[in-house]
Image: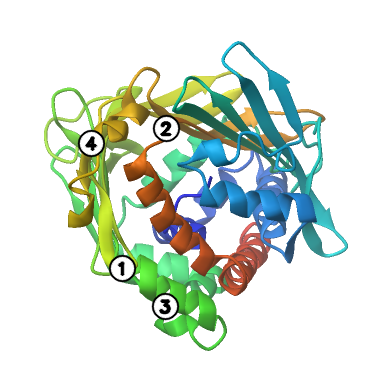
Amino acid sequence: MRPLPNSSAVLLAAALTATVTIGGCRAAALAYGSDVAAAKVNADAFAAAIEARFTNVTRNPKFSAARMRIARYAFAPSKLGNDSSLWTGMRTTRAGADRDLEVQAGLTGGKYVFTARPAVPLPVKTGDSRHLIELEQLGESDWAWRTRVDHAIGPMPPSRADDITRALFLSSERPATAVRADYRAMLPRTTAALGRLLTIDSIATVPQRDGSTLVTLQITVSGDRLKRSFPAFAKYISKYVEPASYRYRLSDRSGSDWFDAEARDQLLTVRFRSNDGQLQPIVGVARRMPDTLQIHVDALAKISFFTVGVTNMQGAFVHTKNARERGWAMHFTKDPEWHLPLITERLLRSPLRRPFEGKGLLFTLGFRTGQEGQTLLTREFDVTVRESAIMRFLGNLGFTAMSDYAGRVEEEEGRFIAESMAAFRADVASLTAK
C-alpha cells in the first residue's frame, strides 16, 4: 500500500535538501561513525543502500500483478481475499483467513529485483530488503492491513541516528550565510542533483537571548528543471505534488510547538529552534523535549477533478530509544476532519472513522539491529478499513494517481533518487578525506 499522490522522491528529496542545508559540514558527516574511517564506511553504505533500491527496478510477474491489484482494491479488500494468485501464504483462522505476500529484493546484475516468494529471511547484504504485506479479515466488512519493510543499510549502529540528528540541528546554529556557503562547498554534487527538483529560497537563523537559534528554511518544489532529463516525472510533480498542501506539526501537552513543516503553493517552510543540537519549543522557555509529542497533520491533494484529504489529524509521536533500536512511531486514534467532493454527501461516512478506532492507525520508521552486522532501516504501517461505498470511492481516486505513477514516471523517479544518492556518496568520500 503506497501513499498517493505523495511521490516518495519528493519526500526523500525534501528531507535530503533539509539535511544538506542544515548539515552541510564535516561534523555532521562524521556523526555517522566514531571516527573518520567508520563515518565514511557507514555514510557510504547507507547512501549505497538507498541508491541500490532505486536502480533499474524490476519485479517478477507475480509481484508485479499483485502490486497493482492491491493498489486497486486496498479499500475494497473483499476483491482480494480469495485470490490465491496474489498471496505467498494463506491460512485459516476463526475469523476467516489470513493472507500474506512476502517479497525478497536486492541488486542483481545492475537491477534491483523484487521477487515474491514465501519464507523470506531478514536481509544480511547491504541494499537488500524484505517486504511483507498481510491482510486479515476481522469481520464481515472490516479488514486489517499490516505492512513491514526491512532494508539493510550497512553497519551503522542504530544509536548513530541520534548523533546524526543532533549534529544536523547543531550545524544550523550559525549565521545563514555560513550555512549556505558550507553546504555549497561541502556537498556540491548533492546540491546540484537535488537542485533539479528543489531550490533553497531562504535560510534564516536568528540567535535568541537564551543561546538557542530559531531556524526557518524555505524550499521551492518544482518540476520545471526536471523536464529535460525526467519529462514524465516532471509532469507527475506538476500534476500531483505542486498543487498539494501539507502540514506536519509537533507539539507537547501544553500546546507548545517543537517542529513545523508546511508545504503550500510549491513552497516548503520548515521551522524549529535548536540549542546545542537539541530541539527547543519554537516559542517559550527552553526545556528538554519529551519522548512523546503530539503530531498534527493536514494533507490535501488534487486527484482528477477533486481535492481530497484530511485536516486536524492528531496522534502520538513517540521517540523509540533502546539498545537495539532508534526510531519514531506515529499512532493516530482520533478521526480527523475529512475533505471530500460534494458527490459523496449521500454516502455513509461512518466507515471513515474505522481506521482510528481500536488500535488505530500506526506508522513507524526507524533503525534496528539486524543480523550479520547489518542495521535495518524499517518501516511499518498498520490500518483497519471498513469496506463501503465511500471507501471504494477513495480507493478509486488513489488508483487513478497510482496508474499515472506506474511505468515511466516510476522509472524516472527511481533514476532521480539513484543519481542523487550517487552524488551524495561522492561528496561524502571527498568530505571525509579532508
Q: Residue 216: x, y in percent? A: 24, 56
Residue type at the position of mark 2 = Val
> Mark 3: which secondary structure?
loop
Give the class, few, some or many, for how many residues have Cα within 10 Å of label 3's Cα (few <14, many ≥20).
many
Tell me the tag on residue 177: 1
Using a 10 Å C-alpha cutoff, classify the residue at mark 1 as few (fewer than 14 neighbours), some (14 to 19) or many (20 or more). Answer: few
**Residue 385 disc label:** 2
- The dot on residue 223 is 3
Chain-order first, disc 1 or disc 4: 1
Neighbor class of circle 4 (other Cα within 10 Å; few <14, some 14-19, many 20+) is some
Residue under numbered circle 4: 336
Q: Nearer the viewer, residue 43 or 174?
A: 43
Q: CA distance from mark 1 to mark 3?
A: 27 Å
Left/right of residue 427 with respect to residue 350 in the rendered view: right
**Amino acid bearing label 1:** Thr
Relative horizontal placement of residue 26, taking residue 258 as reference (left or right) = right
* Distance between mark 2 and mark 4 Cα atoms: 15 Å
Identified by mark 3, the residue type is Gly
Residue 279 rendering spot, x and y as whole percentages: 30, 36
Disc 1 and disc 3 in contact, CB within 8 angstroms: no
The amino acid beneath tag 4 is Pro
Where's the C terminus, which quadrant?
Answer: bottom right
